[in-house]
Image: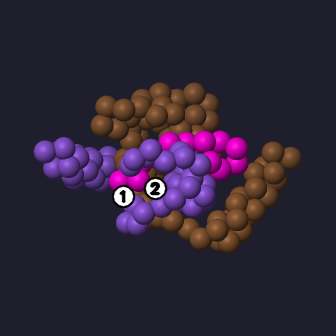
Chain colours: A purple, B brown
Amino acid sequence: MCMAIPSRIIALDGEMATVEAFGRTRTVSLMLMPEPVGIGDYLLIQAGNFASERVDHERALETLAILGEIVDHAEN
Amino acid sequence: MCMAIPSRIIALDGEMATVEAFGRTRTVSLMLMPEPVGIGDYLLIQAGNFASERVDHERALETLAILGEIVDHAEN
């Protein structure tokens, strides 16, 4: 299950944005945004504080290996 | 775009779990889990620190109104 909360940009600092929803603020990366954004725009922010799905060990380890390669590639 | 990181449960405290992925730990709610989980299980945790999509103001406000009603209903 994928959940996202529309969150309003209240501040920008380079590739990072401070967003607000329901009175709570969060700092998010704009690295994956395909277009420029401005203060007042709404971004969809995934609800990262809730687990809603379990994944089996084998699939988890495969996915982590792929994500690890992507991270390594991005850093080098 | 929906992204999730398989994250291993390293501690449980009632409806909250501490999970680990790539050396970072996060505390997540299990409120939405449809099944019991245990230490060592992998959960899919949404990558809540990245914005990847903008949403227009009207749709954002509609969604926030619906989410606000759900929150009110859950609290009362």
Identify the residue position indicated by label 1 in the image: A32
Region of the chain picked out in magenta, as a range: A20-31
A58 relative to B32 in the view: left or right = left
Amino acid type shown at disc 2: Ala
A47 relative to B69 in the view: left or right = left
Q: Nearer the viewer, residue A25 or B1?
A: A25
- Is residue A26 on the magenta stretch? yes
Q: What is the chief secondary structure element of the magenta stretch? A: strand
- Residue A45 appears at what percent x and percent y? 52, 55
Alpha carbons under labels 2 and 1: distance apart? 7 Å
Residue at 53% over, 38% down: B28
- Residue B61 appears at what percent x and percent y? 70, 65
Amino acid type shown at disc 1: Leu
User: Which element carries disc 2, helix, strand or loop?
Assistant: strand
Q: Which chain letter matches label 2? A: B
Q: Which chain letter matches label 1? A: A
Q: Would residue A14 be seen by someone viewing this image from the given angle?
A: yes
- Residue A60 appears at what percent x and percent y? 31, 49
Q: Quadrant of the C terminus of chain A?
A: top left
User: Which element carries disc 1, helix, strand or loop?
Assistant: loop
- Residue A43 appears at what percent x and percent y? 54, 59
Residue at 51% over, 65% down: B54
Identify the residue position indicated by label 2 in the image: B51
Residue at 68% over, 72% down: B58
Classify 10 Å Cα crowding around label 2: few (below 14), some (14-19), many (20 and above).
many
Which residue sits furthest left?
Answer: A76
Q: Which mark is residue A72?
A: none
Q: Is residue B71 above or below residue B13?
A: below
Q: Nearer the viewer, residue A64 or B65?
A: B65
Q: Are marks 2 and 1 in contact (CB under 8 Å)?
A: yes
B14 relative to B22 in the view: left or right = right
